[in-house]
């Protein structure tokens, strides 16, 4: 729900939109599939128009009760999700997707009128990969979608040959995409896993918020650094007694340190 930013003349946006070529699926590869879930028809109509314009395959849902069946059938590569919907809100939908064995790793972007800091925190804690408040600029949304697909296209083993990273009493198994804390497996979202892996790989070295945004989220421009802070807070909660392994360097960023 919420206000929607259209082009300045108030009409349907024109077909001319400057987006990096990386945002567009390659001609020789299958089009990336995006599922848009919002009870406002004008929002889903606009986004379907914009995404199809960039050669994405798009399906929209205005009734959130249909989400699980349609998602299993469509098998999207990314979900755009409103929060303020009747009968089943976006946070509930996100939890359902994260609990599904097949769809738990599908990236989710919340697109909602609820833009306060507490709302963003709740969205990330629920399992969102990104969060954009309405009214929004479709160019920014397209670039965020591009960043997620670019990140997913990067080979997981591209950094070191090492398969398991350890720090204190935590172990990160890259091949199994698994974290253990004092011998107990701890479930992380895909973004949390990438963030922790990067910090542990570069333990002892300070990672600025801007550096983390570029290397974990693949953002090339400044956005709100609260995104990083929120994920770090959630990561520390999941590390439990080992939370002190992630150290805050005030005014700069974070680093992983030996106990």
Image: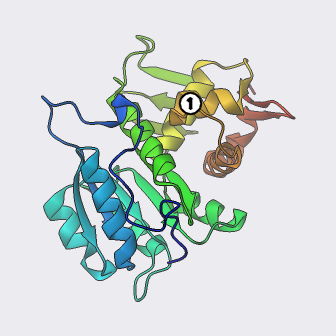
The vertical placement of 206 against 50, above or below, is above
User: What residue is drawn where x is 39% and y is 70%?
Assistant: 43
Where residue 162 sits, quadrant-wise, is: top left
10, 86: nearer the viewer? 10
In this picture, residue 48 sits left or right of residue 231? left
Residue position for label 1: 220
Q: Secondary structure at mark 1?
A: loop
Residue 244: image quadrant is top right
| Mark 1 closeness class: few <14, some 14–19, many ≥20 residues within 10 Å | some
Number of disc labels: 1
Which residue is found at the position 36% from the left and 25% from the top? 154
Please tell me which residue is depicted at 70% across the width and 49% down the height of the picture: 226
Q: Is residue 223 left or right of residue 62?
A: right
Q: Does any portion of residue 169 appear in the rendered image?
A: no
Work out which quarter of the rendered image holds the C terminus and state it.
Answer: top right
Front one among 132 and 206: 132
Q: Residue furthest right?
A: 250
Where residue 60 appears, as percent x and y from the top left, is 26, 68
Residue 155, relative to residue 2: is it above or below? Answer: above
């Amino acid at each position: 729900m919420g206000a929607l930013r259209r082009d300045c003349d108030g009409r349907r946006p024109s077909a001319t939109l400057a987006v990096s070529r990386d945002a567009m699926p390659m001609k020789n590869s299958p089009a990336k599939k995006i599922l848009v879930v919002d009870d406002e028809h004008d929002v889903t109509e606009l986004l379907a128009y914009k995404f199809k314009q960039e050669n994405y395959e798009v399906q929209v849902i205005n009734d959130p009760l249909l989400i699980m069946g349609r998602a299993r059938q469509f098998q999207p590569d990314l979900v755009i999700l409103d929060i303020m919907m009747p009968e089943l809100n976006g946070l509930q939908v996100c939890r359902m997707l994260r609990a599904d064995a097949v769809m738990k790793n599908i990236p989710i972007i919340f697109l909602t009128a609820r833009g306060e800091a507490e709302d963003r925190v709740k969205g990330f804690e629920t399992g969102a990969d990104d969060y954009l408040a309405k009214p929004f600029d479709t160019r920014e949304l397209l670039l965020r979608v591009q960043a997620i697909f670019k990140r997913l296209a990067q080979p997981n083993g591209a950094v070191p040959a090492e398969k398991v990273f350890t720090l204190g009493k935590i172990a990160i198994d890259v091949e199994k995409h698994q974290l253990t804390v004092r011998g107990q497996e701890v479930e992380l979202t895909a973004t949390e896993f990438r963030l922790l892996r990067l910090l542990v790989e570069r333990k002892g070295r300070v990672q600025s918020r801007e550096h983390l945004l570029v290397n974990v989220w693949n953002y090339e421009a400044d956005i709100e650094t609260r995104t990083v802070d929120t994920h770090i807070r959630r990561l520390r909660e999941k590390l439990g007694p080992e939370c002190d392994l992630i150290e805050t360097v005030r005014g700069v960023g974070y680093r992983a340190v030996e106990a």
